[in-house]
């Protein structure tokens, strides 16, 4: 039996954050795909796991956990990862960056939100326009929050902020948002690319064979 089971979707940036953390922790974990495009998240089976109808959901230690940042904190507080600075000021900086992505940028660029915007206008192009409208300004703000020298989001150590940023850059590229002119973000992406734990969490590594 695996140590943990993650109910996730291969392109979900929230799930991706948790996949990276599970890999960094060296846990034996198993993915249970939830097909968001097929609406599996709205079915009774998934709603029994998470009444919000969202991913990820992590089964671990006899618990069922939701919300990616809460899951990252659980892994931290149970000693499985060390991704939170001990210094209170640095920890606050880390949370500000992580929440700017996970709580401000990601929710408005969620699949269901963009789909609803397209449904309201009746124009499929609305989906991409909506994504680009929010992603670029959001990342420009994050760029300004990042450490000047790095190599990671808040300095020399990998933190939860990096786990939030990297998946969002995939989303940016998917919707045609330019980020190459954001030097700090580009630096963080290059540094994180060196971790096998990040590479094994990428959508291409998780993509179901039937997609």
Image: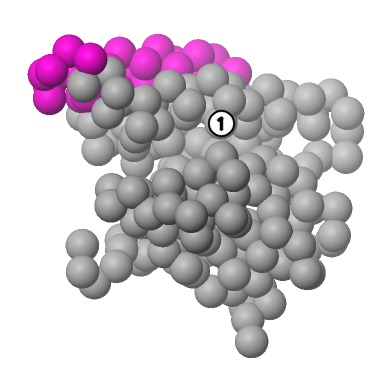
Residue 54 sits above or below residue 127 on the image: below
Residue numbers of the magenta segment: 120-146
Residue at figure coordinates x 36%, y 32% from the top left = 112
Q: Is residue 121 visible?
A: yes
Q: Is residue 176 magenta?
A: no
Residue at figure coordinates x 45%, y 17% from the top left = 138
Residue linked to disc 1: 102
Looking at this view, is 57 or 193 the one in front?
57
Residue 13 sits above or below residue 38 on the image: above
Instruction: State the SS at label 1.
Output: helix
Residue at figure coordinates x 30%, y 13% from the top left = 133
- How many tags in the picture? 1
Q: Is residue 140 magenta?
A: yes
Q: Check the picture and name the quadrant holding the N terminus.
A: bottom right
Looking at this view, is 142 or 43 the one in front?
43
Which percent across, then down, holds residue 182? 39, 23
Magenta stretch: dominant secondary structure: helix
Q: Check the picture and name the quadrant holding the C terminus.
A: bottom left
Which percent across, then down, holds residue 155? 67, 35
Looking at this view, is 42 or 62 the one in front?
42
Q: Is residue 180 visible?
A: no
Residue 82 sits above or below residue 176 on the image: below
Which percent across, then down, holds residue 210? 21, 69
């Amino acid at each position: 039996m695996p140590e943990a089971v993650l109910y996730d979707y291969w392109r979900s940036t929230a799930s991706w954050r948790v996949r990276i953390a599970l890999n960094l922790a060296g846990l034996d974990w198993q993915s249970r795909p939830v097909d968001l495009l097929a609406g599996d998240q709205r079915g009774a089976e998934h709603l029994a796991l998470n009444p919000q109808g969202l991913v990820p959901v992590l089964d671990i230690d006899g618990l069922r956990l939701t919300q990616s940042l809460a899951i990252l904190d659980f892994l931290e507080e149970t000693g499985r990862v060390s991704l939170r600075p001990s210094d209170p000021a640095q920890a606050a900086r880390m949370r500000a960056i992580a929440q700017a992505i996970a709580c401000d940028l990601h929710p408005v660029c969620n699949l269901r939100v963009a789909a609803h915007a397209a449904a309201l206008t009746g124009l499929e192009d609305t989906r991409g326009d909506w994504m680009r409208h929010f992603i670029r300004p959001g990342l420009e703000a994050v760029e300004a929050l990042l450490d000047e020298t790095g190599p990671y989001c808040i300095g020399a150590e990998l933190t939860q902020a990096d786990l939030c940023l990297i998946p969002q850059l995939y989303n940016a590229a998917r919707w045609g948002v330019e980020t190459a002119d954001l030097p700090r973000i580009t630096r963080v992406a290059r540094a994180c690319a060196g971790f096998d734990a990040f590479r094994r969490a990428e959508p291409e590594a998780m993509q179901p064979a039937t997609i």
